[in-house]
Amino acid sequence: MTTTERPRYSVIGTRPIRHDGIDKVTGRALYGNDIDVPGHISGAILRSPYAHARIKSIDTSRSAALPGVRAIVTGKDMPYVSPKLHEQGEGSLVNLGMLSRNCMAQDKALFAGHAVAAVAADSAIIADQALKLIDVDYEVLSPVMDGLEAMAPGAPVLMEDLKTNTASLFRGGGFKKDDEPNFETNVASSFVLEIGDLANGFELADIVIEHDYHVGEAHQGYIEPQSATALWGPDGHLTIWCSSQGHFSIRDLTAGILQIPVGSIKVVPLEIGGGFGAKLFTTIEPVAALLSMKCGKPVKITLSRADVFDAVGPTSAAHVHVKMGVTNEGRLTAGESRLVFEAGAFPGSPVIGAATCMFTPYDIPNLRVEGFDVLVNKPKVTAYRAPGAPAGALAVETVIDEFCERLGMDPLEFRLLNAAKEGTRRVTGVASPRIGCIETLEAARDSDHYRAPISGPHRGRGVAAGFWGNAPGQASVTASILADGTVTLVEGSPDIGGTRTTAAMQLAEALGIPAEQVRPSVGDTDAVGFTSLTGGSSVAFKQGVAANEVAKDLIAQLRARAAKMWTANPEDVVYGDGAVSLKSDPGKRLTLKQMAARLNETGGPIVGRAAVSPGGVGASHAVHIADVEVDPETGKVTVLRYTTVVDAGTAIHPGYVEGQMQGGASQGIGWALNEEFVYNSEGQLLNSSFLDYRMPTTLDVPPIETVIVEVPNPGHPFGVRGVGEIVIVPPLAAIANAIAQATGKRMREVPMNARRVLESLSANGSSPK
Amino acid sequence: MTTTERPRYSVIGTRPIRHDGIDKVTGRALYGNDIDVPGHISGAILRSPYAHARIKSIDTSRSAALPGVRAIVTGKDMPYVSPKLHEQGEGSLVNLGMLSRNCMAQDKALFAGHAVAAVAADSAIIADQALKLIDVDYEVLSPVMDGLEAMAPGAPVLMEDLKTNTASLFRGGGFKKDDEPNFETNVASSFVLEIGDLANGFELADIVIEHDYHVGEAHQGYIEPQSATALWGPDGHLTIWCSSQGHFSIRDLTAGILQIPVGSIKVVPLEIGGGFGAKLFTTIEPVAALLSMKCGKPVKITLSRADVFDAVGPTSAAHVHVKMGVTNEGRLTAGESRLVFEAGAFPGSPVIGAATCMFTPYDIPNLRVEGFDVLVNKPKVTAYRAPGAPAGALAVETVIDEFCERLGMDPLEFRLLNAAKEGTRRVTGVASPRIGCIETLEAARDSDHYRAPISGPHRGRGVAAGFWGNAPGQASVTASILADGTVTLVEGSPDIGGTRTTAAMQLAEALGIPAEQVRPSVGDTDAVGFTSLTGGSSVAFKQGVAANEVAKDLIAQLRARAAKMWTANPEDVVYGDGAVSLKSDPGKRLTLKQMAARLNETGGPIVGRAAVSPGGVGASHAVHIADVEVDPETGKVTVLRYTTVVDAGTAIHPGYVEGQMQGGASQGIGWALNEEFVYNSEGQLLNSSFLDYRMPTTLDVPPIETVIVEVPNPGHPFGVRGVGEIVIVPPLAAIANAIAQATGKRMREVPMNARRVLESLSANGSSPK
């Protein structure tokens, strides 16, 4: 671990057992489908077999007549929500109309798997039979399955009245809402980011390289399929039990889609078996709610694995065009990119993520990125760890690798020469705050891995850098002191990567007590204040700010209480090392535990609260090193060694940071080499199972080596940056560069599976040399 | 409703629909037995058939061999806890050793129904079979079933080493711990309360009356039998789901009995189907926990109705001797009482409740009360609404009725002449604060009922007054403002009588918003700060204080936020009528709802907290009026008309106050006329079912008329006193007085059932005349 400027901590940086660990490894933790609300019945969803079809009519009469069927919902039951950006109650902008139509098709089915009706019945078997008795009359239309084709004149159009512009126009760092769509076709939105003078930048270059890349969609592959139980009471109060990456988001979006007040909904969070971005927004909850409203019973919908693949989007497939210029001395002068990202059937690809990250590890004065969010007849994409960034990094980092090859420079030294640092102007026009780009590059250069030579036939080493901005958000917590000195902490962030523990550790640090003395839990939407999504690598960051604030509240009360007990001036009471003491008489000292035992007799319980919306988000940088061996006969790529270097700011629990790094690298390796969605000509997914959608197993990845760099984020009380997403940015590029070194062939299509590698090996002239 | 000095409220005093009402009337609310923790198995308890027996050995081998049996617990598995007063973590004194032995017998079974072993098995049927295979070798001993007999020399002794003195010695208002027991027999503790000069007091009297009374035990008769599910994880964390009158109490007592830290236990409260005092302390939870620890699975124990009658105590049976003196002018000069209260098998009768309440409605300068807490071979008594007070009131109020008869005075005018008021010295030596004794007497005198004549043969009217001190306690709450202006309120008091709503109403009043805009819920022990029992009529009182404090916290934050939004001085921002506004520019105004919609964009969520341990408890006074008709042929007493007058301080929700008044009166009528425990000569209960234990039905009680008096409690922000217990103090006496007027015979044994009434009618000389 490389650490700079870090204060001395007693809890932060240690590796306590996670508070929820035993429950999870013993199978006791309750996930979405584990909750059985008394009297609940089964919900099931009918999905369109066609990728693009007009729904002429739906006849539910045969289905409704089946004994045991309690409720049927179709698009007609969904309240009308206009397809425009809605200001959500809690401040964010969401296109609720689009989200509603994704939950349940209205006049058209826009992808194979699109929900067209739902049933609630006394058993799952009856519900399944009932689906088969729903008669949908489709007019089948031609689908368009590729982003570039969807932009071409004459392409099938998904939404005739598409007038939405979900993203906005950036230019030179400015920000301007552009209400008029730029295209009349399937382009949901577009934007340009620009700094400097691009033409001049390319004029200054001695070498210019330009390529096209394509990255296929990848699925997050979380273990737990979506599951939600909804109970709509006759008083209009709706309770939803589900696992998600934000129960407040589920509440607010469900309220928006169903057009009911947020105050009438309670969402109870269950443990989440992986999300990676795919469980940020609502999918089945409004449907379960409407079924419950119709039948008056709790309704549970649990997706099958096939449903998850067919209908709850993977990340975007992307076409990336990139052009970069460099001087003979190795100085980057210009970068240009055109990004066409597939949104799936509804707007919202992460093209902005690619655009804002791809060039950001570097100080390049002249940049232009054009981005397009394009509808195609595939499931609406969902976020997937650093959404958009891996595809952008693939293009930039492999072009840089070509530069290094041409210039004969070490790829890490080249990157260090061009590395972004505090003050570097980004493509958004904003100057970089204190970041760890240089430190991660240096740590990679100095790592065991990089210093070890690689040799042997068909072997190669690739490196790639990556950037991710991380997100802010809101967090609310409450904390109480129990009589034995335990401090309970209630927070509102569903815990995916151990964030209950990192929040507890930051509270423990602030209170000067052991991590085990804090007992954290995740409260439902009625039990704790608004807390934004578990996404954007925000949780350790914002919950740390909240934990620090709630500690201040508790400490102020402990000081006041001690002052009362000692009849001392509160100003004379100080708190430190887990105890109150008297400045004027240091012999007077009571630990938090001692105070705790006497709270009720000395004035009552002590409860603290904090609600924060912190600025000061710290961006993350990473460098990955991959060694591969390519089998020239089969095209199979074996990853021999892999190291991931990440600037965590401060690693609250290094074990979990390493877990994120290893998980992100493994997912990146899978995406780079194997994972892909295979559609037939009619737009139907052919590999919607874990057997056919090939994620890496332990046999496919080597032990992932980790190097945590700590350049504390000055905007956070403990220096946290966030590590959940940055970890997946470099792998595609690092492996592509390693394959290039091993084979002399540049792969520009992901996944770089055996077939493609074999094709590249047998092709002529695709080598850059 | 008679109201004095009350401020103008907009929410308080209205009758909104209770927030949990729909869930409860539609059967959706989850009670103790409604929760099915995944993988849970069934627990069952083996009970002693003998009222008094030495347990020579327990052989569980046959039971353990039964397939499906997962765990067996006997007294040997209970950690040793010494039988002395333990200071509970949260500040209260409890005899954990006695509580432990009540949960599971050690060397002796002390009542028929005493738990001697417990089993967890894969099904309830197997658990039941397994109980039958446990071989307990008993040495049967003679039981003692009456308090006076238990005090007599030579009585069977329950505990040879009884050295406990649960209550303490009061004298002249002083308070002194008396660690030495006063008796070597079955007396667990004794005390004397004394003010003035008793001999002198009786010298001043013109008339002295002296009688002995006996009140049989009555059961609370709650609808929901006890049920608890426990899950003890391998990390030592114990989770308990149960309904109770205080999940913090269940947590703390279970921790004490099992000798584990409170911080390792979480208790999740479920809705409670009645408690009335019987669910304040733990009974089955430690047993379920030990079974779970042994088998590693969640274990649920649900009692049968017979278990409830046999083993979860009724209130005390009591022998009350009383002697009082009065002048010919009707001035009370002296009062003396000797109270022998049965504790059941373990110390803890409510004799102190009788002692401190019986004379307190009156200004009597010379008083002496001697109290004895006596063990007998019956279930350990539990609290039952104003524990102890009804038996004391029976004695005092019927003697006063005799005085009125002798003096020819109206019973209400007599009581008004002697009524306690602010400054009156009580038997504890403490001077009364502002109370509503006179106001309740006046309201009774002026009531429709009292002004209506009663006539006809065998009819009579009785009145009685009552006093109850109410209890303080701790309460913690948190509150959050949702985007639509709804305010969530999390509190820690299980809601028996609508207290979620009264807490929400007091918060709404303080915030100037409608009651429906507050969404209250009860948090588990990890989710909210320590909150003391739902008992002692404390909840509306302490939760009101907490609600008022949390409103202050929210308002302070709203003012600061508004100041920021308006770039104004926070001192210039005021909050009133549900809105912030600018003192200097009243046109600037934002309602809480308007603020709520903009919180996240203006700095983040707002969360409030309060933790209080308020003083200022306000005592309650009541007067009941009963008209009865006695059938001279059968002895059956019919209640013709019944009115209850109570000083609520402030009635937050008058409908719930009336509900308490009507419920308490109905229970009092049942206790007065029908309910009793029938034991055979071996100490076995013969009527442990609702069929044989005869509680009143709607056919047995007339509509109960209610008169709410409001003499605000000056110690509470909204004047609340508490009404849950006072309502059951006068009925025994009021009905006894009515029967006396109807028949000329004084009943001094409760229940005054048909047999006893008939016997009194045929007896000679038992009339006071």
Image (cartoon, coloured by chain):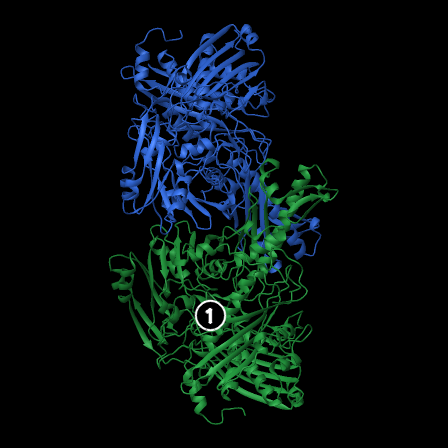
Chain colours: A blue, B green
* Rendered residue at 30%/21% (across/down): A681
Residues B131 and B82: in front is: B131
Q: Which residue is mark 1?
A: B382
How many numbered marks does the figure carry?
Answer: 1
Farthest residue to the right: give it: B584
Residue B746 image offset from top left, x and y in percent: 51, 87
Chain holding disc 1:
B
The reply to whether residue A316 is in sight is yes
> If the image is split into quadrants, where does the C terminus of chain A sit?
top left
Q: Amino acid at mark 1?
A: Thr
Q: Residues within 10 Å of mark 1 (few under 14, many from 20)?
A: many
Residues A327 and A50: in front is: A50
Residues B153 and B711: in front is: B711
* Rendered residue at 39%/71% (across/down): B309
Instruction: Give left or right: position of B134 versus B707.
Output: left
Residue B750 image offset from top left, x and y in percent: 46, 81
Q: Quadrant of residue A401?
A: top left
Mark 1 lies on a secondary structure that is loop
Q: Quadrant of residue B273?
A: bottom left
Above or below: residue B392 compared with residue A469: below
Instruction: Give left or right: position of A178 versus A239.
Output: right
Residue A279 image offset from top left, x and y in percent: 43, 35
Residue A519 image offset from top left, x and y in percent: 49, 47
Above or below: residue B707 compared with residue B397: above
Q: Quadrant of residue B257?
A: bottom left
